[in-house]
Structure formats: structure tokens, C-alpha cells
Amino acid sequence: MAAFHCVMLPLAGEPAKNWPQWRGAHQNGTSTTARNLPVNWSETENVQWRVRLPSWSAATPIIWENTVLVTSAEEGFDAIRGQTGRQNRSGKRDKLLLLAINRENGSVLWQREIGSGNRRYRKQNLASPSPATDGEHIWVLTGSGFLTCFDFSGKKLWQRQIQKDYGRFGLNHGYASSPLLHNNHLYIQVLHGMTTDDPSYVFAVDKTTGETLWKTNRWTDANHESPDDYSTPLIQKVGARKQLLVSGGDYVTGHDLGNGKELWRMGGFNPGKQSFYRTIASSIFLDGTVYTSSTRGRPFIAFKPGHGKLGSENILWKNNLGADVPSPTTDGQLIYILGDKGIMVALDAKSGEIVWDRIRIEPGIYSASPTLADGKIYAASEDGTVSVLQAGRKFKVLAVNKFDSHTLASPAAVGNQLFIRTAEHLYCLARR
């Protein structure tokens, strides 16, 4: 490990000033509190520290005050044909790990096993789900079904096996959804169907005990691979109350937080009822509107939730400009969409007007979702190229930076620091 030290800005124990779970405190890849983030960097320039990780993962770094949390497989990696791959020369079933890292200097505070039996599914492995934290406890779910709670000293408080409780996961490319933390509950979705006849389901867990509070099946008429979903749900205020929003299996549904009851359902995301319309990108929510990208971005629909079965009267606008893998982000005025091949689109959130019309940034394959903070959009390609764009109606490239390693994980921004995970290292970037 190489470490580079600089003075940090003051920290605060509030969710909005941290990055507590997948896509941050606002569940849309934005930070409203990060300031003075770096624009340019190299392997040494503007690097506060970097730490070598046991292996690669698509999981986002999670940050709370002075601790950075990352999941990892135990084994190494191979870079084959532009993709990070799994390397396991021992033939053993390697472990899945949670690491706690000191945010100030990059030292590893502790490392814990969170599961075993890692497998590679093309671009992902079973360490893909991102952790969640409330600043006192840490929850982590593996693609093999281990759900574990730790305290910040690394003490294991409880663990359960979801596949043992409810049956094996039946997704074509392995389970990758992250647990969603809200108040005293964790919300977890298992949307599958390619390799199982078991129904998809959503359930809530008491964060203190790990006990299931409710579990509800989620009906779909999607077929073959189309029930499979790799996104993470949202919790947003719809009308007078907060609801759980679940995307995938050809539908977006809203659920009661108290009992899981389905409150509404929006279709139209697989109009041809194709058999291979699995969902990867997560939805975002802004001013009472849900923005959802279907498979390969066709269609991308902005709609207003309501009650029961929703239809065309609920659609604010739609087009075919969505993305297959990266989730969109927003600055409150525009919706920013990063396509898998590096095509950027910006749409007016209210009207759907095209503001950035399919502009290519650096060539490459993009799996990480864009992160918006400090008026900048950070877009990382799989080959380690990170484009820094100016958010706003006028498209402007501020910088293009290159790491000497691949990346699948979405960046995170806290304070004056940007955290980027590559196949080999976790970087903490800051102006120096």
C-alpha cells in the first residue's frame, strides 16, 4: 500500500454529508454537500491515498465520517478483453470480505469474512452488492445470500442466509442488488426467474435483530430472463407517505413500507414482451416523478405514481434514450444518462426536452453509474478512464483522467474527496 497524507475538511455524522449506501444519501448518485472536488489527477497527482484491495468488485465504496467500507472477493483479478475477470488458481472456493479503511490515511482498520463460495458471472462476482450503514452499524449482503450486520469495531452482531431461508437465487448473471436502509429497517429485493420457477419477492428486515418483518411476492408476467433484475430499490415520498419503489421484471411497483403491500404498478417497459429484457439500471425519483430506464434504454419513461394499475395518463414523457447498465443521475433540473458505449444525454426533467443530444465522451464500455457532485459529473469507463463533465445545460468536458486498471464501481463523493475503486486499488482523491 502507498499512502499520501493531506488535511481533511471537518466531518459530520449526517447521512447527507456521508455516502451511506448504494448511490449515496439521496439514492440517485449525487452529493449536495461535497465541495472543491478534484478535476485532474493521475496515479500520483491529487491522490490523498490509495490502498491495494484483495480483488475487484462492482460494489461502491461506502463512507461514514472517518471510515470507508468496501466489499471484495478474496482472490485476484485478470484483465481480459477489456473486462475484469476472476482469477483463482488455487481451485478453492474463495471468501467474500468486508474491509474497513481509515478515511484519513488509507490504512486498513479491519477485515472480516462475510461469506464464501465466490463465483464470477461475466463482469460481476458475488461481492457486487454495496454495504449500507447508519454510522453505528454496517450491513452487507453477498451475491451468495449472506446478510450480515457488524458494528464499527468489526464485531459481527448477526448473520443469516437468505437462500437458506427462501430458496436459491435464480438470476442468469448472479445476484447483485444492494440492501436499502431506511430508519430501522433494511429492504431487500430478489427479482429473478431465468433459472428458477420460484416467485420474485421483496422483504423488510429489522436492522437490529435481522428478523424478517414482512415478505411479499412480486408478481410478473415477464418470461425467460426478463424477470431478472440487478437494480436496487428506492424509498421516496409519494404523495403523503414514503413508499418502496421496485423496478424490474417489466414493471415498476410501489409498496407500503409497513407491510409490503403493492400500492401501484406501472408497465410498458417491455412492450414487445421480449424474453431477454433483464433490468440493470436503477430508477431515480425527482419531484414526484419516477425516471426508469428499461433494458438497453428502450424505453426510458418518466411517470407519476398513483394508485392501482397505472397507464398512459401517468406518463409525463418517454423516449428511447435510456441506458442499459449505468443508472441515471440528476441535478434537480436535468436528468443525465450515460450509455454503455459512452454516449451522454441530458434531458429536461419536466418536459423531456433533449439538452445534450447523444454526445460521445471518451470511447469505451461504461458499467459504473455517473456520480454528480460539486457541479461536476464523474463518468468512469471499464478501462479506468474517468471523464469529468460540467453539469448544466451547456456540455463541457473539464478533464479526462486515466487509471492503469479497470473499474466497474461507481464513484462516491464526500467532503472534498472523491473515492474511486479500480480492480486493484481504492483511491481517495483530493486537491493537493
Image (cartoon, rainbow, N blue to C red):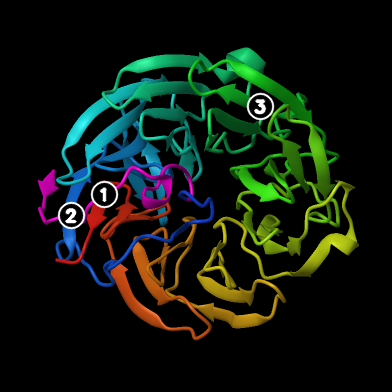
3D distance between C-alphas at marks 1 and 3:
33 Å
Picture quarter with the N terminus: top left
Which residue is disc 1 drawn over?
A: 11
Q: Position of residue 99 (x, y in %)?
A: 29, 32
- Tags 2 and 1 in contact by the CB under 8 Å rule? yes
User: In the image, what residue type sits under mark 1?
Assistant: Leu
List the single residue furthest toward the front: 240
Whole-percent x, y for residue 253 in the image: 76, 44
Residue 155 vs 80, above or below: the answer is: above
Report if residue 194 lies within the magenta region: no
Q: Is residue 4 magenta?
A: yes
Name the kind of residue labelled 3 in the image: Phe
The residue range painted magenta reads 1-23
Dot 2 or dot 3: first in sequence order is 2
Pair 2/3: label in front: 2
Identify the residue shown where x is 41% and y is 35%: 133
**Spatial distance from mark 2 to mark 1, Cα to Cα?**
8 Å
Question: Number of labelled discs?
Answer: 3
Under tag 2, what secondary structure? loop
Most prominent secondary structure in the magenta stretch? loop
Q: Is residue 254 left or right of residue 349?
A: right
Circle 2: is it few (<14), some (14-19), or many (20+) Cα within 10 Å? some
Q: CA distance from mark 2 to mark 3?
A: 39 Å
Q: Earlier in the sequence, mark 1 or mark 3?
A: 1
> What residue is disc 3 on?
203
**Which residue carries the number 2 mark?**
8
Looking at the image, which is closer to me, 243 or 379?
A: 243
**x%, y% of residue 260?**
73, 30
Q: Foreground mark, 2 or 1?
A: 1
Q: What residue sits 48% from the left and 29% below the top? A: 141
